[in-house]
Image: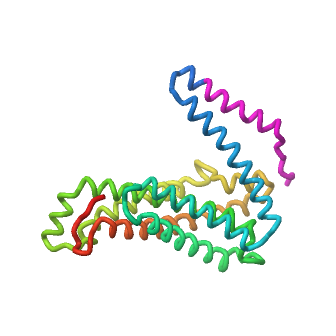
Amino acid sequence: MDALIQLDPIDLIWGLGMMAIAIGLSSWQRLGLEIPLAIATGRTVVQLLVVGVLLGVVFGLNNPLAVLAVVLAMLTIAAITTRNRIGKKIPRLLPVVFSSIFFCSALTLIYTTVLIIQPETWYEPQYLIPLAGIVLGNAMNGAAIAGERLVSTITSSRLEIETHLSLGATAQQAVAGYRKDAIRAGLIPTINQMMVVGVVTLPGIITGQLLSGINPLDAASYQILIMFMLAFTNLTTTLLVTQGLTRQFFNAQAQLTLP
């Protein structure tokens, strides 16, 4: 296959033309999206260029500490973002989210790296950093969706929960149904993506590999593996986050205490 066609600054400037047209259409239709689109465009350019330079240095170093530092930074940002989306007022939520995402993502990456991909070194940045980014991003979204759903449902169902508690139900039993619904909500995007992957959509990983000249069957094989990774990580993360989140709503006497 042909080598990847590289994009120079002129090509990216032409690419910006699409955003300029989008901003113009927003103004024409009076959608009020001109400023958000402009900010998003600027952030996309700056963030990705900085990441490109940073990863170039990390790949060149090929040092485990440098690779782990990048992964830790991504993990921290993912945990903080998830905490903010679920609710800043909930006490001790950040440690719950951080530990849940860390444990589930690490378990997935170790399983995949040791048993399946088996690179020459476990910290090979070519594999670890992209896979960690994909796993952490999806774990963040799944945990945020499940957490938001659980918080809103518990908040709006206080009387029903307290009724269950007064009838002798434990805290876990009183919210079991709400927790299951929250976990399902967190898994819906991943399951939907798995249902149509390769038929309706081509995810970013397979598209990037195809653009780089990888054999289409090899690209499809990696995408299959990644979809399995995402399903496993999202399920385990939402299980742990909703479990930990439930504890934050009850005191030692199993009384409901909303923040």
Position of residue 59 relative to residue 120, above or below, is above
Q: Position of residue 35 (x, y in %)?
A: 57, 31
Q: Say which residue appears at 63% left-offset and 65% top-offset.
A: 132
Q: Quick check: can you spot residue 28?
A: yes
Q: Say which residue appears at 23% left-offset and 65% top-offset.
A: 256
Residue found at the far bottom of this picture = 115
* Count of numbered marks: 0
- Left-right relation of 147 to 230: left
Q: Quick check: can you spot residue 221?
A: no
Answer whether residue 20 is magenta in the image.
yes
On-image quarter of the N terminus:
bottom right
Position of residue 156 relative to residue 121, above or below, is above
* Magenta-colored segment: predominant secondary structure: helix
Q: Say which residue appears at 55% left-offset and 53% top-offset.
A: 196
In the foreground, 134 or 93: 93
Q: Say which residue appears at 25% left-offset and 53% top-offset.
A: 156
Say how the picture is coloured. Answer: rainbow
The residue range painted magenta reads 1-24
Quarter holding residue 55: bottom right
- Left-right relation of 148 to 62: left
Q: Where is residue 143 in the image (x, y as percent from the top left)?
A: 46, 61
Q: Where is residue 94 in the image (x, y as percent from the top left)?
A: 46, 64
- Left-right relation of 246 to 196: left
On-image quarter of the C terminus:
bottom left
Q: Where is residue 115 in the image (x, y as percent from the top left)?
A: 65, 79
